[in-house]
Amino acid sequence: MSRISQLPPSVVTKIAAGEVIERPASVVKEMLENSVDAGATRIDIEVEQGGIDRILIADNGCGVHHDDLSLVFSSHATSKLRNADDLFNIETLGFRGEAMASIGGVAQVTVQSRQHDQTSGSELTCRGGTLTPIKAWNGSPGTRIEVKHLFFNVPVRRKFLRKAPTEMGHIAETFVRVALSQPNLHMTLRHNGKLIHEVPATADLQQRIGIFLGEELRDTLYPVQANYNDVVLSGFVADPSVERGNAKMQYLFLNGRWIRDRSIGHAVQEAYRGLLMTGRYPVWFLFLEMPPDLVDVNVHPTKCEVRFRDGQMLYGMTLSTIRKRLSEENLTPKLQPPTSTMEQPTPSSSFPTKVTLPPPPSPTGPTNYSSFPTSSAANGAAPKAPPANSEPVVPKPTVPATEHAPPLEFVVPQPPAPPVETEPPVSSPVTADEPANSIPPSAADLASAFQNAASEDRPETQTYTQSNFSPEQPDFKAIQLYNAYLVLETPEGMLVIDQHALHERILFEQLKTRMRDQTLETQQLLIPEPVDFPPDQAALALDHSDDLKELGLHVEDFGNGTLALHSYPALLGNKAPEKTLRAVVEHLATQDRVPTREQLLNDLLSLMACHSAVRAGDPLNQEQIAALVAKRDLVDDTHHCPHGRPTSLLFTRRDLDRQFGRV
Ligand code: ADP
Ligand code: MG
């Protein structure tokens, strides 16, 4: 064993830097926080090559005194904390005195600063921890800090950096967080000389949200406001109709600091319970203000996680405030599936059927969802079976809600009765109870998609269309159960099909084959559709634009986090292409490491398939059932969905006979 020795300061700094400075965006975050702490009202940021080459931040804050300048780069040197007691009363964003030392240790940094009452300022450079002598500097009051060649002396770290647009995306996200938390600041952001954002000082937070995340989203926001003892909760929650596939559009600020907090996140999710499908996330911007002694911000190196003194109270306060706010809105109409773009299925009166009608549903049968908590049943226009890909729907135990939340009066508005259209309810016990027009677009897409696909894929087989669908075909009996499963009589036995899983598999195979054969047809949009993203996601999508194009999704930069969508895969029918793009980009954003190209394409194909497939909970008419089942034989692996779940289960005739003691 080697002997113990004290590490040299340069190594110590690099280790410390590893905790605080992970990428260019971390530098921007720390420096922006310093400018805010310095009382700046204007901050200008210039970035080159995603911040890997250069970051310059200029503010008009209080500046650093000439005599203190060299201390800026010393570890544990700060102007914000004097003694240990102060640690529990922190009113500034910074307090550890570590960030500038860390940045100076792993980059080439020049600080120029002048206090407002000084006639001239001074300048100091720190190169990988080594200081140059202080010089005079004649700039305007405030501080300018330039960081060049980040990680020039830590090649391993440099290697871990992503391409410039991705790093720039992270910087832009950091910028958004600070800009949302400090609406009074005038801020600008430039990348490679191009102005990315200019946000004027404003008292109107909603306007600022609109600048970054689009006017469309801004107009769906409901303000919230609550006080409890010394705690104030305020901000905005978005209408459930703008839900997302991940939690990235959820912003929480504590005393002006952006933070992450799982418990608050959970409380908000609970408040939306019943208004969103499983696995979907609401969009929200919440601000907590409380006396600093009610929270410990010193629990995480980058201070983005904190410990609340009374987390339970905050949980309850958040849940009840948002629930109450949402219940004030009549949200139901927006939850109904859009019917305008939907292809109407042929009326089933013209449908020659062999489908066997099951006996009427028993009131206590498993399709009776009325015993679910009100909020769970409010998923849509009609009581629904579990959403796609979910575990069986059982009322989730509302443990955190009932444990922490104060008792609530929360009534989800009942949906108005939808107009009845052509489809008589004949197919299954569940659909018999459902309003006739509740066939969602995906189900309608199914039939049309299959017609196209069947005729293109297998010219040698008899083409299935609604018109040539004769009583001789199909030679199976099928019923739909729980709007989720198809039960089929086959020569081998009783086959139970998961409608979503099977459709997903079929779409996946079709997409894959066509992509491989380069016959994936794309649907060009006459007018490219602008789709808003958080800046980091937009950058990521552009980073992968070639891969996306191969998938039929052609996107171009529209500026300010907006992508212009030019085309989408025709196979996905009339599903909103914007939603598919969003799901694909969100998937990209949740990848921890860069996947191989093959893996990525595979993932995205499966995601698009999943997104476009008919869902559990979608009632299907007989034609749609027939189309789905007929298509089953046309793909290679229909036994498993792209996620590996089985698409069907077979109970053989022999098994059934045996179980019933017949043989
Ligand atoms: P902390 O913010 O935790 O105090 P930092 O390492 O980030 O530690 O900064 C060290 C010190 O440098 C700060 O306490 C502050 O006095 C000074 N400083 C850094 N940036 C600025 C700035 N933009 N304006 C004024 N002072 C600054
Ligand atoms: Mg700081």
Image (cartoon, rainbow, N blue to C red):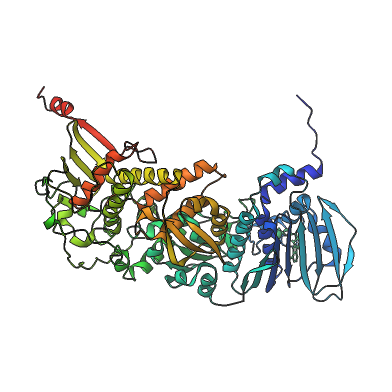
Residue 272: where, in percent of width, then height? 37, 60
Residue 23: where, in percent of width, then height? 66, 52
- Name the residue at 72% across, 55% down: 99
In which quadrant of the rendered view does residue 493 lie?
Answer: top left
Camera sees residue 313: no
Q: Would residue 656 be found to the left or right of residue 577 on screen?
A: left
In which quadrant of the rendered view does residue 93 lie?
Answer: bottom right
- Name the residue at 56% across, 61% down: 535
Residue sitting nearer the eye, 567 or 536: 567
- Name the residue at 11% across, 45% down: 356
Camera sees residue 73: yes
Residue 517: where, in percent of width, then height? 44, 44
Residue sitting nearer the eye, 126 or 616: 616
Residue at the far top in the pictured view: 663
Where in the image, quadrant-wise, is ligand 2 located?
bottom right
Quadrant, the N terminus: top right
Q: Would residue 164 be found to the left or right of residue 650 on screen?
A: right
Residue 351: where, in percent of width, then height? 13, 53
Quadrant, the C terminus: top left
Number of numbered labels in the structure image: 0
In the image, residue 300 sits, relative to residue 423, either above or below, namely above
Residue sitting nearer the eye, 488 or 68: 488
Residue sitting nearer the eye, 152 or 138: 152
Residue at the far front in the pictured view: 460
